[in-house]
Amino acid sequence: MSGDGTGRSDDESEQNASLPGQAPSERPHPEARRNTDGIRIDPVVEAEHEPRRAVVSALVDHEPGVLAQVSGLVSRRQFNIESLTVGPTTVDGHARITMVVEETDPGIDQLKKQLRKLSAVISAGEIAGETVSRELVLVKVRGDAPEQVQAITEMYDGETLDAGPRTITVELTGDEARIDAAIDAYRQFGIVEIARTGETALARGDVPTTPGEQPAPGCDTDDRERTAQPSADDGSAVPTEPAARTDGGERRPTK
Amino acid sequence: MTDAKPRHREYTDETASRGAAADSTDDGIARNDESDPRQEETNQDRSHETDDDGPVSTGAEAIARALEASGVESAFGIQGGAIMPVYDALASSSVRHVTMAHEQAAAHAADAYGVVAGEPGVCLATSGPGATNLVTGIADAKMDSDAMLALTGQVPRDLVGNDAFQETDTIGVTRPITKYNAFADDPNTIGAVVEDAFRRAGCDRQGPTLVDLPKDVSLADVDEHAEFDDTTSTEARSDGERNPRADPDGVEAAARAIESAERPVCLFGGGVVAADASDVATTFARTYEIPVTTTMPGLGSFPEDDELALSFAGMHGTGYANMAITHTDCLIAVGTRFDDRLTGGIDTFAPEADVIHVDIDPAEISKNVHADYPLVGDAGAVLEQVSAAIESPPAAEDWRTQCTEWKETYPLTYAMNDHEPLKPQFVVEAFDAATADDTIVTTGVGQHQMWACQFWTFTEPRTWVSSHGLGTMGYGLPAAIGARIAADEAGETDRDVVCFEGDGSFLMTIQELSVAVRENLDVTIAVLNNEHIGMVRQWQDAFFEGRRMASEYDWVPAFDTLAEAFGARGFRVDDRDDVPATVEAALDYDGPSVIDFHVDPEENVLPMVPSGGANGQFALSEDHL
């Protein structure tokens, strides 16, 4: 049975063993190429993808290990993530993870698809259409010029949480640019510490924030609003703010 | 390090044996986020042990029943402290347990069992080192999308997080390498969790799942009146109900692309085998006369003796497959994730091709190679859809002629004369010639694996069992054990199981010979012994100016006498003329046998596409690299 197999050439005593055939340089090779995203580059389909900022929202089971799943996914696949916030939603046992990423379109697409594969993810997607988004920051500045600090705090609609002889701590909310600007303004007094939550976001209007997302039963009816009104004494005008605040310590992302 | 395990027995018997179940006898089961059980556990009332004369069902028994209900016939594993209750329950179950020599081998055996049987394989290990030893095998199964369920013991819940003896954060460690994992914290649902994990392993894109089983939960009594609540939010949207069929509009568009293609090529991946779609895929290619390449895991999805077969593409694939995949204008890729060993450099991969990508996992679409026609669904179902939509076959006669010419121009051969040492390729061919088509081939990782791919003619699915994505040396022998047991269970005791190993690879799991002997498994192991980490040696010669750092062995054991010491049959072959008779004798031996083939240490695997290179520029000799 020896030598019954596939094409074997006996007694070819070439010293520098080479398989038969044309050398690589002699072979024809197509001119066309693909880019790093595996997309064919030619005049018609040419599409170099620039990274862009995207807000991806994921509705997840509120259970231990979910954040580890998500952050593990993000780090392992090298997605460029700017911030990540977590908090409960209207539905018991659900939480929302809001991620701001700086990625190319194929990258954002991959992130969404990979998120959806996680067992704890209920739905995930880039927030479609317009988003309303807010970030909360606590800034502790030197207390040498309390009036001037107060003026800037008022200018940015902030709130003074603590004022001592040596430091003043203020709270601000806003979009990233606004908070950056405020921090710049405080710099003149000497900033001691900063804590930022990262951006959290909802889709504007009646668009669900994650695909197919539904509020908990009875949560958004007129009936519910009427009865719930009196107890809502904390006039939370910015809907995202409470979510950022109630962000439980152990669920907070570690960067 | 593993010799620490037996000591666990003394430890756990005192701290967390049956008595530990008592703290959950009053109907509320303590949750691990409460601190009170910690207090109760130390003041254990051991009198509870006396009431086990009644038929008390425990968490462990629920696990055993779950495995039986899932149709599990065999499981591979190693005993140890925290998993003891589960083993105790397995003793009175219908599940056959195969005791392995190392947990890594248990995972590989379960993996291979799953590939051959078409059902998820099951492996078990204790906590700590048992679980971490499984890790390589789990990662291997993940990379190859092989269905497998791993059950790991864990320290009792009240000790979790305390750095207890043999405690590892198994859930944390295995999170990135499992498709799904779960910490079972309730004896009333532990059976359902195990069943669910088994189901998840085998559905959609298959993969390894793991359930971590704290010892106190396995030991705890199951509340007979507790309803199995399998409608928890996670399960309600179980990912098992994915539509197997692709979007009809996408199918139509893909069909038009195939009809108008002039140079179409099929690329069948491991997904075709996993989906049991080999028949459909073969019919598809033959109906439209489209040449077929496969990936390495896709070997066996299409008969390699077919006229249309171009064998496998990629780094060490055939020249003709790589020519075809480079020049195609329509690549019909089914069940492949476009691994870099297949694509080479993405920039030069099938650069003129419209890519039709059929895959069950939407995340694979356009991950590495952009899909012009994405078709998400089951390989077989979608190919049938596409087939129904194609109105006329592509006019590809010239292309088929071209492919045939390439087969003639770039044959897979090797030089051998009487004066040269034995060639490893010759050994592979001799085994192929001596065995039937349904023979199962397993391998380790390295040169020997590539020669097995190249010189074995695969004609049937589930006959090729190897470590593709992770490239785990030492995979071959444990895989042969798993494959043998799967074949025996299916009544195919006459089927041959041949394992090709390298000397370096074999040494990584050689202890499993003890298992093959103990279980009297009829496997034949061919060691292609070149006294090197051959693939590394080849790369050092090509890319590191021949500096053979740490790749040359001065000495390797005599594998034939070593095999005899284990109780297996051992043979040694140095001469080409002795190959056929020895192969015959080893195959005839009813039990594990090892042939130590001393082969040419300078033989290289060719052709070769250098890492990141262009497939069409494959090297035919070392000079081309």
Image (cartoon, grey):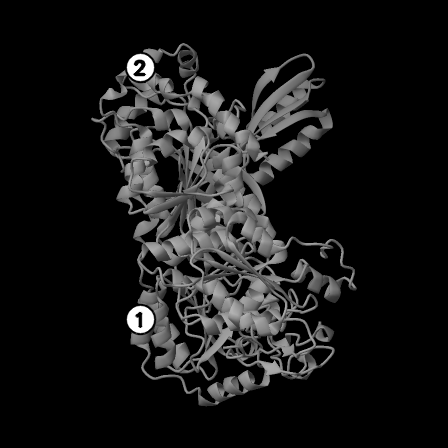
Q: Chain of mark 2?
A: B
| Residue at x-position 65% and y-position 32% | A183
Q: Which mark is residue B425?
A: none
Disc 1 crowd rating (10 Å Cα; few below 14, some 14-19, many 20+) is: some
> Would residue A41 be visible to someone looking at this image?
no
Q: Which mark is residue B48?
A: 2
**Residue position marked by numbered label 1 in the rendering:** B384
Residues B326 and B494: in front is: B494
Instruction: Say left or right for B31 vs A151.
Output: left
Q: Position of residue B276 (x, y in %)?
A: 35, 63
CA–CA distance between discs 2 and 1?
A: 61 Å
* Image quadrant in which you'd find residue A142: top right
Please, is residue B113 above or below residue B419 in the view? above
| Residue at x-position 51% and y-position 42% | B102
Instruction: Say left or right for B363 vs A183.
Output: left
Q: Position of residue B4 (x, y in %)?
A: 56, 30
Please, is residue B208 above or below residue B164 in the view? below
* Image quadrant in which you'd find residue A18: bottom right
SS at circle 2: helix
